[in-house]
Amino acid sequence: MTDVHSLIGAYVLDALDDIDRATFDRHLRDCEVCRQEADELFEVTARLADGAWSVPPPRLRDNVLAEISTIRQLPPTMVARPQPRSRRGMRLVAAAAALVTAAGAAVAVYTVQDQRVRDAQSRLEAAQASEARVRSILGAPDVQTRSETLKSGGRVTVSSSRLQNAGVIMLTADSAPAAGSVYQMWTIRSGAPASAGALREGQSAAVQVVEGLPAVSNVGVTIEKAPESATPTAPLDALVNLA
């Protein structure tokens, strides 16, 4: 859970969503330290935004250099003691540093969240496209369906359409293979097997679209070592004849 105190920078930058802002507003009513820090951050933000922060006039450098020549140097054995800053000045510096840190954090959080949204949108679009492709194949007027029982328990069903030049392999096992093993599907053309995809460990069902499936003579299923095998391991768990 996010520490509510850590939201102060994003709160001042108006980078919180409605829920977090409402939560922090309630927190401010009870936390005097956060109210004071928020006020200072708002002040720093205002000062950064106005014209108070400007480029020093060109004569400032000459004046400083002239004054240096009139100041007696300290003996080598003496250590210059730093002049204490006012507590308010130090707090404003700390507030400004916190503001910059919060701004960077807010940008980083937004970037990560934006990328997650984009990734989720891409996965959703891919899933929708795959579902539409499955429907078009299964709904084709020339679709042919064949199935076989898995020796390990379950069933594999293959639907193929020449009009769509594609097919769908639907695997439904009674249970997933033992740990470290996975189900893998194969297409066999002219006696040569090619992987049609492997399930993940612990997975017992899958729907796989295979482009060009009508040119395939058989579809096989094997149990392989995770994550997958380059060649099928005998004996086959199921073999569906499409010829």
Image (cartoon, rainbow, N blue to C red):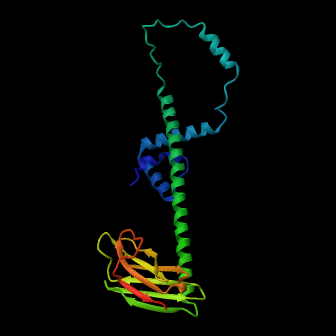
- For the N terminus, the image quarter is bottom left
Residue 139, percent across and down? 56, 90
Q: Is residue 69 left or right of residue 190?
A: right
The picture quadrant where one finds residue 226 is bottom left
Residue 75, percent across and down? 46, 6
The picture quadrant where one finds residue 34 is top left
Residue 164, percent across and down? 59, 85
Which residue in the rendered view is the most extreme toward the right? 58
Compare residues 187 and 138 and report the one nearer the observer: 187
Which residue in the rendered view is the most extreme toward the front? 191
Compare residues 144 and 77 and report the one nearer the observer: 144
Across the whole image, how many numbered discs are drawn on residues?
0
Above or below, comparing residue 219 to residue 8 in the picture: below
Above or below, comparing residue 19 to residue 66 in the picture: below
Which residue in the rendered view is the most extreme toward the left? 178
Residue 27, percent across and down? 43, 50
Query: Residue at point 51% right, 84% down?
Result: 216
Query: Residue at point 37% right, 79% down?
Result: 222
Compare residues 161 and 12 and report the one nearer the observer: 161
Above or below, comparing residue 24 to residue 86 in the picture: below
Compare residues 145 and 44 and report the one nearer the observer: 145
Q: Is residue 150 left or right of residue 28?
A: left
